[in-house]
């Protein structure tokens, strides 16, 4: 290839795209070039309604000038500062503001750059915590089938998605999994939290019997599993998990990378469900997707266990070059201002019943075998084409894009999670488009 061809904007070859059918994309590229409010614009000038907040992250919508200004001012003022043995005021302010949004007792925050890093960080803190207390035999980690915890080795090990695991070797040792809570035969077409399945939490007792509590460090679950197709916690399930963890001295980690920052109409799932974990992983909505940033919020008890060692030592040998990045911190502070000033979590809560009714209006549409929702999350499960799993939903994705709507599919499930600034007219557009498309697909 000539140099000119290699550097041409039409050369799509060099970028190896993540979680993408690269060859297929490159024969039919979908190129987004700008974004404002609820809409993207593509290279053809067409408006694309954002039905998914990008990848579940742009909770404040796109291009809010308060975030844009905060970021550009911060880059001009101080582009970077390390957080190893140094600090800058904004990151301390941000940690205090985020932890202030949690119930008291979840008082400390470690910063990362992504959900995957947050998960690895939380798992490492859990292991190191037990060791710091002289309980270092607790090394086992428990995840859940159909859990998604990012793509680090820790995350894919505790995660429960075969496609993300099978080609990458042996995974972390000493990991086991709870069963998932997707029970379509009992809970199909539930509105909100499903009635059936709380007893699945008791599987943790079975794992305790099998492995012995003294070997188990932590359980990690998404309060609502998003990426594997919106799997909701049955009523009473999370409470039961908390009880069993308490009984056996096991830490409970909530992966709130998706449920955090208003997705359920509360600041966090922790408050929404009234169940307090020991560690919470965050990312995405922390900066409304504008600048990569994640974090782990942890209990006072965990933090204090590290702070009681000799005071000249580094308490946790862990961190990233960009932990507490000042530009990300500025973006996050401005994002929290947007949430607060515009009452976006309350808004999400207010519009959720309209969202629910609109989603469930698809009940009799062809191929629809389940509809699920909570807060501003929705899922439409389609009957798979025999011998061609995922094909029907992917066709729907392509057709929605052609008609100006961004959705997300996983297997034969369409997942929806609009920005919290969504209006009723956008909700109508989302479901009118889907109704038309689902009648057209094979
Ligand atoms: N945990 C959960 C629950 C997620 O949904 C995701 C991303 N979808 C991650 C972790 C990983 O986040 P990232 O892609 O930022 O690494």
Image (spheres, grey):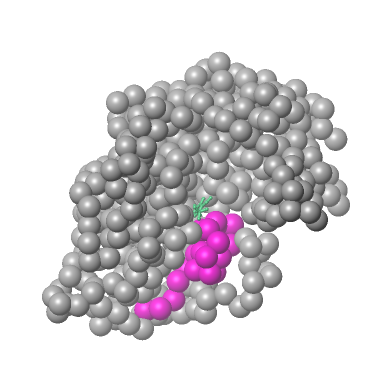
**Region in magenta:** 138-160
Q: Residue at x 54, y 47 (%)?
A: 226
Residue 412: x %, y % from top left:
72, 44
State the image quarter where residue 244 is shown: bottom left
Taking the spot 53% from the left edge, 69% from the top edge, the residue there is: 153
Residue 416 forms part of the magenta stretch: no
61 up-or-down from 318: above or below: above
The picture places residue 354, in percent across and down from the top left corner, at 51, 21
Queried whether the magenta region covers residue 157, the answer comes back as yes
Query: Where does the N terminus fall, quadrant-wise?
Result: bottom right
423 vs 72, left or right, is right
| Above or below for 38 versus 411 | above
Q: Residue furthest top?
A: 425
Could one spot residue 381 in this view of the protein? no
The residue positioned 55% from the left and 53% from the top of the image is 181
Residue 65 at x, y percent in the picture:
39, 27
Name the one closer to the observer, 287 or 213: 287
Q: Pick the residue in front: 117 or 32.
A: 32
Res. 49 in view: yes
Give me the residue at 74% from left, 53% from top. Answer: 3
Residue 356, by quadrant, is: top right
Is 207 placed left or right of 99 in the picture?
right
Q: 121 or 186, which is in the foreground?
A: 121
């Amino acid at each position: 290839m000539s140099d000119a061809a290699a550097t041409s904007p039409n050369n799509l070859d060099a970028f190896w795209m993540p979680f993408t059918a690269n060859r297929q994309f490159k024969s039919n590229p979908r190129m987004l070039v700008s974004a404002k409010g609820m809409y993207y614009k593509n290279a053809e000038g067409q408006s694309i309604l954002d039905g998914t907040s990008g990848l579940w992250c742009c909770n404040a919508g796109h291009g809010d000038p308060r975030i844009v200004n905060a970021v550009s001012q911060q880059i001009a003022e101080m582009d970077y500062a390390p957080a190893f043995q140094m600090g800058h005021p904004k990151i301390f302010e941000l940690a205090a503001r985020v932890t202030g949004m949690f119930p008291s007792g979840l008082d400390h925050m470690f910063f990362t750059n992504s959900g995957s890093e947050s998960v690895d960080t939380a798992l490492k803190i859990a292991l190191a915590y037990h060791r710091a207390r002289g309980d270092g035999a607790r090394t086992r980690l428990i995840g859940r089938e159909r859990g998604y915890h990012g793509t680090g080795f820790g995350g894919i090990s505790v995660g429960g998605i075969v496609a993300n695991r099978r080609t990458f070797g042996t995974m972390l040792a000493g990991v086991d999994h709870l069963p998932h809570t997707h029970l379509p035969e009992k809970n199909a077409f539930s509105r909100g939290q499903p009635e059936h399945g709380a007893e699945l939490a008791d599987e943790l007792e079975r794992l305790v019997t099998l492995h012995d509590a003294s070997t188990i460090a932590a359980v990690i679950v998404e309060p609502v599993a998003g990426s594997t197709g919106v799997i909701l916690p049955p009523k009473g399930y999370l409470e039961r998990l908390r009880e069993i963890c308490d009984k056996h001295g096991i830490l409970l980690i909530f992966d709130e990378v998706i449920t955090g920052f208003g997705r359920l109409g509360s600041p966090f799932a922790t408050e929404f469900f009234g169940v307090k974990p020991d560690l919470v992983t965050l990312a995405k909505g922390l900066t409304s997707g504008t600048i990569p940033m994640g974090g782990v919020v942890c209990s006072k008890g965990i933090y204090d266990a590290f702070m009681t060692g000799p005071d000249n030592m580094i308490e946790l040998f862990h961190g990233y070059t960009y932990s507490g990045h000042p530009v990300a911190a500025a973006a996050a502070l401005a994002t929290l201002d947007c949430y607060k000033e515009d009452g976006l979590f309350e808004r999400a809560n207010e519009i959720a019943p309209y969202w629910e009714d609109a989603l469930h209006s698809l009940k009799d549409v062809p191929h629809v075998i389940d509809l699920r929702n909570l807060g501003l999350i929705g899922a439409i499960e389609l009957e798979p084409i025999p011998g061609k799993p995922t094909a029907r939903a992917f066709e729907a994705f392509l057709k929605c894009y052609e008609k100006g709507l961004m959705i997300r599919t996983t297997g034969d499930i369409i997942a929806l999670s609009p920005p919290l600034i969504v209006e009723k007219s956008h909700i109508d557009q989302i479901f009118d488009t889907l109704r038309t498309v689902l009648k057209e697909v094979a």
